Image (cartoon, helix red, strand yellow):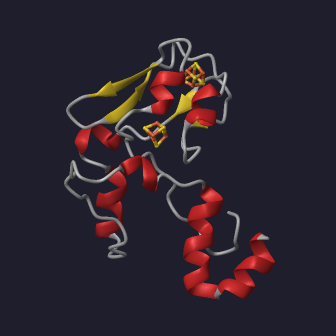
């Protein structure tokens, strides 16, 4: 958590050109065509981190055991995070239909960028700058 109290999801936007998939030297990443999500072959992944570098939002992250990369796979089209958020009545997450006219790559952001955006609204720019730099 970069700013105390502000914890927001940092998720894959399924870029149209999938820089992460292109960057993987092992062929460990592929696209699930039904959902557009990126699938990780954990047996093939060597945890080299090249997909993290290639991602505009630095979305792929290492599994805590360091053995492979983790990327949201959209739970086969039924994201459980959205379900949990609705059940908890926070209503912060919504499943949207994908529109071809939007460049989703532009929306990918690093955890710091996402946190700054939300913190600016909640704490104001001055305080956010003091905390995040
Ligand atoms: S960390 Fe794994 S998935 Fe990412 S580029 Fe390296 S081998 Fe491919
Ligand atoms: S947001 Fe990152 S992880 Fe998702 S498709 Fe784009 S490059 Fe890959």
Tell me the quadrant of the picture where the C terminus can be found. bottom right
Left or right: residue 106 versus residue 89 is right
Residue 40 can be seen, yes or no: yes
Q: Position of residue 124 (x, y in %)?
A: 64, 88
Q: Position of residue 105 (x, y in %)?
A: 42, 47
128 sits left or right of 63 in the view: right
For the N terminus, the image quarter is bottom right
Q: Residue at x 29, y 53 (%)?
A: 102
**Residue 35 appears in which quarter of the rendering?**
top left
Q: Residue 129: where, in percent of width, then height?
A: 75, 78
> In which image quadrant can residue 2 be found?
bottom right
Looking at this view, is 49 or 105 the one in front? 105
Q: How many marks?
A: 0
Q: Position of residue 68 (x, y in %)?
A: 59, 25
* Residue 44 or residue 85, whichever sits in front: 44
Query: Taking the image as four quarters, which one is ligand 1 found in?
Result: top right
Query: Which quadrant of the view contains residue 46?
Result: top right
Residue 62 seen in the current view:
no
Report whether 11 appears left or right of 48: left
Give the vertical position of 29 relative to 1 (above or below).
above
Q: Residue at x 48, y 51 (%)?
A: 108
Q: Residue at x 29, y 36 (%)?
A: 36
């Amino acid at each position: 958590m970069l700013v105390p109290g502000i914890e927001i999801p940092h998720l894959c936007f399924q870029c149209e050109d999938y820089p992460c998939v292109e960057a993987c030297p092992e062929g460990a990443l592929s696209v699930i065509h039904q959902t557009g999500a990126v699938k990780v072959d954990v047996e093939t992944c060597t945890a080299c981190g090249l997909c993290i570098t290639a991602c505009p939002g630095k979305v792929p992250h290492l599994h805590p055991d360091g053995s492979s990369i983790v990327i949201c796979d959209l739970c086969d089209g039924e994201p459980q995070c959205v379900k949990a958020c609705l059940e908890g009545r926070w209503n912060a997450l919504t499943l949207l239909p994908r529109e071809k006219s939007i460049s989703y790559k532009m929306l990918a952001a690093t955890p710091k960028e996402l946190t700054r955006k939300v913190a600016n609204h909640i704490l104001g720019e001055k305080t956010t700058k003091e905390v995040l730099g």
